[in-house]
Structures are given as structure tokens and as C-alpha cells.
Image: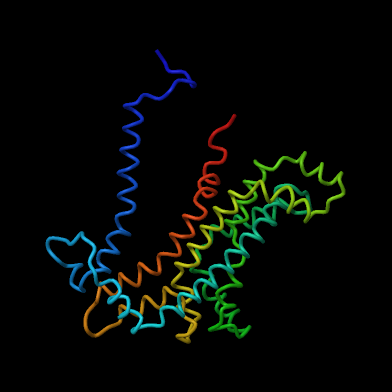
């Protein structure tokens, strides 16, 4: 006999699913736990046999050594400023562009949208040289503007917001706003924005993670150590004549990872809602 949609799930099946999910969660969390274990033990803990799996008491000492090797907090602040600014600008401009492509008719609309999509097929490495030349012409090398301005909008964000708005924002609501005398930006702020909060959270998390973890472009355009982002600062810990101190490296890496975990935990509810929207249809 086939189970109907309204039937309650079998207890054994539910238990099996929870076990699988728990195992998956533990596997996902283990790298962070291992990072903290190595960061809290002596420098040789990473090569210890059998492996050390218990938390030690050397985390503060290891992290203090990292602080003495590099300007960690300066780089941390730089990354926080750059990542927050880029995330805000991407969410703002991509939401507006996605709204325009989804709900407005204008000349060359389809051509422009497919042109934006076409840029997704261009490897990012190909744009490094021309972007660097532009930054040099503008005299923005070794400034935050070289990190922020080229990343203020991206094709994926426009595509993501356009698709979400097309399926979630009903045109009748926009027409009602127009009848009430609301302008374009008021309609966007009062009607569209509350509906697309999950999509904004999803795009914001992806953008913040990608910008925070970016290594190559900051390495190319930044020269002054006081302008380094956190990823460049962490790379300096690998340049030592005394061998790699994994306790020091992992303690600093763990501290650099905390903002990513905090951002995800704060916005995880909207992030999951954004990813699962449209998965269940009434």
C-alpha cells in the first residue's frame, strides 16, 4: 500500500535520516575542530603519531606568536571593511538590476541580460591583466578602491536576483503600488525588498565569503603591509626559516575563520530559505 502525502513518516526512517544528517554534520564540522586542536597544541602536534584529537592549552601562546609575525588585526580589519563594503554594494546593485530585468520592459532587455550571462563563461583569470591596467591608470594600485570597485556588481548576483524576483514578486503587487502613486524606488523598497530577503541573505553570504577568502587579486594589487587583507597576512606565516609552525598557523587561521562562521550563523535561516525557495510548490 502506497503512503499518501498526509501520512506521518515511519519512526525508523526518520531515525535513519537523523543519523545520516548527524554523521554528515560531524564530518563537516571536523575540519574546524581539527584546526582548533592543532592551533591549541605544540607546533609538532600536526605530525604526531597517533594523531592528537584533544584540545590543548597553547592556543593563546600560538596566536601571540602569529601576532608577532604579522599585522594580524590590521589585516583582519582591512578584510572586514572590504568584504562588508563589497557585500553591501553587490546586494544593492544586483537587486536593483535583477528587479529591472525581471519586471520592466526596455529596449535591448534580452540582449543585455544574455550579455551579462555571457560574462559568466569568461574565466576570471583573463580579466586580471586588463583590470590591473585600469587600476594603474586610475592610480588605484595599493588602495582599497582597487579591491572594492571592480567587485561592486557581478553577473551571478544579477542572474540570481532576476530569477528570484521573477518567481516571487507578483506583478499585481507592483501595479497596486503604481495605482497608489508610489515611484519606482518606493515600490522596490516597500514591496519588493521584504519579499526578496532570503535571496538577499543568500547572495550576501556568498559575496562575503568569496571576498573574505580572496587571495590572488589582493596579492596582485596590494604592496604596503598595512593594506594587506587577512589572507595575505596568513600567507606570511608560511615564510619562515625555522620550519612551519602549524600551531601558530592554525591558531591564526581559526581566528580568521570566525567571521565567516558568525555571518553564516546570523543569516543561516534566510540563507536556507533562499536556497529552498521554489523546491515545494503548493
Q: Name the quadrant of the N terminus.
A: top left
Which corner quadrant of the image does residue 47 belong to? bottom left
Asked if 82 appears above or below 275 in the picture, the reply is below
Task: Tell me where residue 57 appears, x and y as whole percent.
Answer: 24, 69
State the image coordinates of residue 170 (x, y, percent, origin top left). 72, 40
Outermost residue on the front side: it is 57
What residue sits 27% from the left and 60% below the top? 34
* Furthest residue toward top: 1
How many numbered marks, from 0 up? 0
Q: Is the image coloured rainbow, by chain, by secondary structure, or in one colour? A: rainbow
Query: Which quadrant of the structure image shows residue 19?
Result: top left
- Percent from the top left, x then y, of residue 122? 53, 61
Q: Is residue 55 above or below residue 13?
A: below
Q: Foreground: 45 or 105?
A: 45
Give the answer, above or below, for where 151 lies relative to 243: above
Taking depth in this image into account, of 159 and 178 the one nearest to the observer is 178
Q: Which residue corresponds to the image point at 46% horizontal and 76% vertical from the top-left?
A: 229
* The C terminus sits in image quarter: top right
Residue 160 spot, x, y in % from top left: 59, 51
Q: Which residue: 43% across, 74% down?
A: 230
Q: Is residue 270 left or right of residue 42?
A: right
Amino acid at each position: 500500500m502506497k503512503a499518501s502525502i498526509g501520512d506521518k513518516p515511519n519512526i525508523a526512517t526518520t531515525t535513519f535520516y537523523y543519523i545520516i544528517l548527524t554523521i554528515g554534520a560531524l564530518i563537516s564540522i571536523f575540519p574546524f575542530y581539527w584546526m582548533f586542536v592543532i592551533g591549541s597544541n605544540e607546533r609538532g602536534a600536526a605530525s604526531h603519531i597517533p594523531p592528537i584529537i584533544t584540545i590543548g592549552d597553547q592556543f593563546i601562546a600560538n596566536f601571540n606568536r602569529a601576532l608577532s609575525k604579522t599585522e594580524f588585526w590590521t589585516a583582519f580589519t582591512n578584510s572586514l571593511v572590504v568584504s562588508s563594503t563589497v557585500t553591501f554594494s553587490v546586494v544593492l546593485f544586483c537587486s536593483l538590476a535583477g528587479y529591472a530585468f525581471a519586471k520592466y520592459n526596455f529596449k535591448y532587455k534580452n540582449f543585455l541580460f544574455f550579455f551579462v550571462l555571457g560574462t559568466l563563461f569568461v574565466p576570471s583569470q583573463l580579466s586580471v591583466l586588463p583590470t590591473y591596467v585600469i587600476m594603474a591608470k586610475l592610480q588605484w594600485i595599493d588602495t582599497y578602491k582597487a579591491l572594492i570597485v571592480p567587485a561592486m556588481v557581478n553577473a551571478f548576483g544579477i542572474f540570481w536576483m532576476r530569477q528570484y524576483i521573477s518567481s516571487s514578486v507578483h506583478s499585481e503587487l507592483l501595479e497596486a503600488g503604481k495605482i497608489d502613486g508610489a515611484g519606482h524606488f518606493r515600490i522596490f523598497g516597500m514591496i519588493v525588498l521584504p519579499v526578496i530577503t532570503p535571496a538577499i541573505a543568500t547572495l550576501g553570504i556568498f559575496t562575503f565569503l568569496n571576498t573574505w577568502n580572496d587571495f590572488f587579486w589582493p596579492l596582485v594589487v596590494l604592496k604596503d603591509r598595512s593594506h594587506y587583507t587577512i589572507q595575505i597576512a596568513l600567507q606570511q606565516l608560511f615564510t619562515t626559516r625555522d620550519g612551519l609552525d602549524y600551531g601558530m598557523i592554525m591558531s591564526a587561521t581559526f581566528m580568521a575563520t570566525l567571521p565567516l562562521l558568525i555571518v553564516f550563523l546570523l543569516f543561516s535561516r534566510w540563507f536556507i530559505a533562499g536556497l529552498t525557495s521554489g523546491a515545494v510548490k503548493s
